[in-house]
Image (spheres, rainbow, N blue to C red):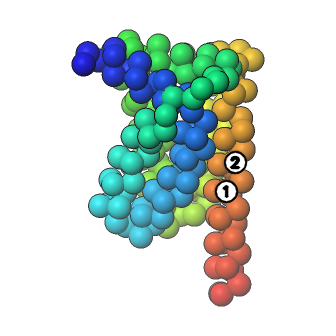
Amino acid sequence: MEFQEILDWAFQRHLNPLSWYIRPIFLIVLVYFAYKRSMKGVIITFVLMMSSMVWFPAPETINPQMQAVLQYERMLLSNPISAIFTIAIMMVFVVLILMSFWKHSLKFGLIILNVTLIGKVILSLLFTGENGWAPLGNTIFGLILINGIGWFIMYRKRKNE
């Protein structure tokens, strides 16, 4: 299989909304392992999170806005220079998130997570126009899930002190 065929196969499956909604759950597991300072847990969860885009079958009906956003992402990853730049920026945010939780800085970690999730929607809007609203549903789901858990943990910590 050539690289382009693999990319086609992967992006067809990534059009399944489940592959977008599972990412925030992996983020929670990822930061949990960072907080517990388990490098093995971080690595395994990161690999699972990155591979989750191909876990689900290609959808029967495709959201045209989602398809436009993913087409733009695909274009970025098809060009070696933009692929390196895109992956590097993504990794900077992942490392910042992991470092924050590794150092037990819940507030800073939540700020970085919020900036990352909201930033993805903003960039989608900038680069794909109105189609950039497509990831809003899973972004809101992720923000509610992550912030809800974070605020609950901070509340419990304050209550116990």
Amino acid type of the residue tagged 2 in the rendering: Phe
Q: Quadrant of residue 128?
A: top right
Cα separation, mark 2 vs mark 1, equals 6 Å
Where does residue 4 sit, x and y in percent of width and height? 34, 14
Amino acid type of the residue tagged 1 in the rendering: Leu
Where does residue 137 sit, x and y in percent of width and height? 72, 38
For residue 81, say whether it is visible.
no
Secondary structure of the residue carrying tag 1 is helix
Using the image, determine if residue 4 lies above or below residue 148. Answer: above
Which residue position is annotated with label 2? 141
Where does residue 47 sit, x and y in percent of width and height? 35, 46
Q: Which residue is nearer to you in this view: 53 or 157?
A: 53
Q: Which residue is painted at 69% across and 48% down in the image?
A: 141
Query: Quick one: label 1, few (<14), some, or many (20+) residues within 10 Å?
Result: some
For residue 75, say whether it is visible.
yes
Q: Which residue is painted at 49% across and 38% down in the image?
A: 56
Secondary structure of the residue carrying tag 2 is helix
Q: Quadrant of residue 146?
A: bottom right
Quadrant where the C terminus sits is bottom right
Using the image, determine if residue 64 lies above or below residue 148. Answer: above
Q: Which residue is painted at 61% across and 36% down in the image?
A: 17
Where does residue 41 sit, x and y in percent of width and height? 35, 61
Which residue position is annotated with label 1? 145
Residue ranking furthest to the bottom: 160
| In contact (CB < 8 Å): disc 2 and disc 1 | yes
Relative to 15, is 159 on the left or the right?
A: right
Q: Which residue is painted at 33% across and 22% down in the image?
A: 6
